[in-house]
Image (spheres, grey):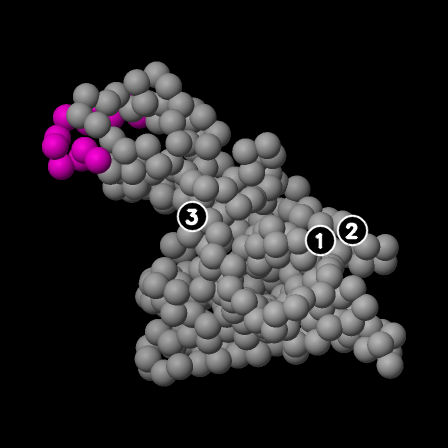
Amino acid sequence: MDEFNLNIDDINDEGIRIDKYLASALPERSRNYYQKAIDNGYVLVNGRQVKSKYQTKIGDEILVSIEPVKEIDIKPEDIPIEILYEDEDVIVVNKPKGMVVHPAPGHYSGTLVNALMFHCKDSLSGINGEIRPGIVHRIDMNTTGSLLVCKNDNAHNSIAAQIKVHSVNRIYKGLVVGNFKEIEGTIDAPIGRNPKDRKKMAVVTDGREAVTHFKILEQYKGISFVEFKLETGRTHQIRVHMSHIGHPLLGDDVYGKPIKNLVGQTLHAETIGFIQPTSKEYVEVKAPLPDYFEKLLEKYRKEIK
């Protein structure tokens, strides 16, 4: 574990959120990385743990413990992938259910990155490192649909900037438990780590801004077919927000209840729209609903006839 000692002795460094300060003072890691490090107790201010919202003060002594990057050999694998769109800068794939986006403990092979490395050869952006080449955003393992991947660093910077200002158009379809009186609505509730279970996310007062717009497409007996439009893109955002208002995603085994013969949440990233990094033209790509989802819709529609 590498340790860094920082002292706040410049008035220009005072009154800054600790996570933002660290991302500036130690730019080798992202602000998101430091938020996680703070949550896990790897950042001490004057010998005490703080939260990410802590604001720096003159005289603060900050100790940061950072784990060295582990060198892992990620190999290309000839795994079939469905390509929805591709040009010299980006590629949009239709991620299947059960596929992990990038290597992580317990999943160092069979991931989308392994497949992309085989398909794209050396044409993937390197900004997110060797573990996540090309990955500028991600969707959960059991969520299906459109995933945008960057093939060079210029494209990565362009798409990342669009995501940061919430200009990427992301529309999801999902089945949720329960029925609604209203036809549409907006959930504006901050999301952060669940204080009782650090592996889960939750709506928390000191979380990051999270906004989800939803529209009811169809309603069945105790189940609703819903369209979601993301204004922000927090981890597990749709799943957390829907569970928060009492309508968890059907089959969500983390924020709801598992369903027999259904693997994880019924959620599909249908549409992704973005400005092409080179041409500056708007590109919109749609992924068709997977077969399992269509069969569920057919089943519920028959039940209400």
SS label for mark 3: loop
Residue visible at 67% across and 66% down in the picture: 180
Q: Residue at x 82, y 73 (%)?
A: 300
Q: Residue at x 51, y 64 (%)?
A: 186
User: Which of pointers 2 and 1 lies earlier in the amino acid sequence?
Assistant: 1
Say which amino acid is labelled 1.
Asp
Mark 3 lies on residue: 208
| Numbered disc total | 3
Could you say which quadrant of the image residue 57 lies in? Answer: top left
Residue 124 in view of the camera: no
Which amino acid is tagged 3?
Arg
- Identify the residue at horizontal 60%, vertical 50% (top origin): 244
Q: Give the spatial CA distance, label 2 vs label 1.
A: 6 Å
Q: Amino acid at mark 2?
A: Pro
What is the quadrant of residue 145 in the picture? bottom right
Per the image, the residue denoted by label 1 is 252
Circle 2 residue: 258
**Left or right of 109 on screen, residue 189:** left
Local secondary structure at mark 1:
loop
Magenta residues (range): 2-15
Q: Is residue 102 magenta?
A: no
User: First in sequence: mark 1 or mark 3?
Assistant: 3
Residue 160, image x and y in percent?
A: 38, 61
Can residue 107 be seen in this snapshot?
yes
- x, y (%) of residue 95? 63, 66
Asked if labels 1 and 2 touch by Cβ distance under 8 angstroms, the answer is: yes
Residue at the farthest front position: 181
Real-space Cα separation, disc 1 to disc 3, in angstroms: 22 Å
Residue sticking out furthest to the top: 47
* Distance (Cα) linking label 2 and label 3: 28 Å
